[in-house]
Amino acid sequence: MTKRYEDASWKESMRIKLDVNNMFAENVGEEHGYTKADVDAMQEKAKAVHKSIKAAKEAGNLGFMELPESHKEIAKEIKEFADANKGKYDNFVVLGIGGSALGNIALQTALNHPYYNLNDEARNGYPRLFVPDNVDPTRLKGLLETLDLSRTVFNVISKSGGTAETMSQFLTARAKVVEELGEDAVADHFIATTSEHSGNLIKIAKEEGMKTYYIPENVGGRFSVLTPVGLISAAFTGIDIEELLAGAAYMDQICDTDELWSNPAYLNAALQYLADQDGKPMSVMMPYAHDLKDVADWYRQLWAESLGKKVNRAGEVINVGPTPVKALGATDQHSQVQLYMEGPFDKVVTFIEVEKYKETLEIADGYEDISGVSYLGGHTFNELLTVEKQATELALTENNRLNCTVTFPEVNAFTIGQFFYMYELATAFAGELYDIDAFNQPGVELGKQYAYGVLGREGFAEKKEEFDARPAKNSDLIL
């Protein structure tokens, strides 16, 4: 059976588009807008960066670029496993944090029914999905008390098997399963997604007979949504993960050029970089579709953890990085947009627009004698949300505020795959412009090490000593 993503005309009709008109002086004025010459001046650098990225991919250092091809067979196996277990579980729980959770949440919100967990018909036999992506005791305890553990499977996601938050969740969930179902039930109620060759989790999984899936060694957490990290929960909730990878492959083809004006990932990164260098370090992502609200959350981690760095590749202290901000249209027109419109000129707003929503809903007629209300009748909520986006875009542009738009023909697995890949590649390109390592996160590690020391993890006694020697707080400054 031919899949729709194998049809060239369908793929072209589903291509997501980047509109950067409102990044240029013709639209937002010369003081803040850019010119064609500004972009052209970066073309030689773009060619060098493209060459560097291609070389790094060939050397196996950019694993996220390999996934659309390397994970085709893995996706088929995951799909078969999910389908074989479709009626076995009522609940699928992801135990993970950061890059092991945000992609799962984004996929679920984008591609499944908005009330998936509450709607039996929408689930069509697939389990409910829960992603308790924190270690808040009230939330986790409430979840474990609420679920029927005999009908629940947990996917434990940690590449190292040493992530304190994830392994704490695992220890607690495992203990509850053993308490209620017995030791022999562990293998049947846990999946381990981890490193294949090292770490604590793979050791535990093998000893206890858990189903295992592997995170490639050359793919970091925030780039891992198209690995089993994101694919397993997606498959278990009925998402077409093969189409998701096909979308990423399509965007890879589109971006296989060093020409800035033809490469949406590179052009977007270049313009965001220019804006940051010009005193606009705030990068706002504002979807005008509730389906895409958690995509902005995923972007926030990708951009912040990749590009916020203390030193460049030469070890020089540079303290760079744009600050990503999450917003949602039209909700945040009533909270954040006042600041964007009249506050400091320190932001670039990226709108996300959907041409065809999954549903059409008419606004009911009523109150014909009240013109300030009745005018809405006969329109649709689709029109209302689209017009609000276009009106906000125009208002920002008229106020000389930089903005651009990513347009989805519709929200489906193919377009989401394109989006993920485009922004991951844009991140790699931006890292080269900043001359930093976009794939490490040393700033996250120190806080982890202090926590390990305080909690008694072997090898971190020195960090506990540093923690215990921290300056006492002045009680006069605690009101």
Image: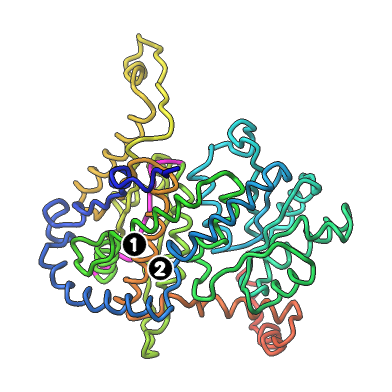
Q: Residue furthest front?
A: 1
Task: Tell me, yes or no, whether the highlighted magenta stretch contains residue 150.
Answer: no
Q: Amino acid at mark 1?
A: Asp
Color encoding of the figure: rainbow
Residue 364 located left or right of residue 434: right
Q: Is residue 281 above or below residue 377?
A: below
Which stretch appears magenta?
Answer: 278-290
- Tell me where residue 25 appears, x and y as whole percent: 13, 57
Residue 225 located left or right of residue 130: left
* Residue located beneath label 1 in the image: 252
Q: Is residue 258 above or below residue 111?
A: below
Give the Cα separation between the discs numbered 1 and 2: 8 Å
Mark 1 in CB contact with mark 2 (< 8 angstroms): yes
Q: Residue at x 47, y 58 (%)?
A: 298
From the viewer's side, name the closer residue of 21 and 91: 91
Q: Amino acid at mark 2?
A: Met
Query: Quadrant location of residue 248?
Result: bottom left
Residue 472 located left or right of residue 14: right
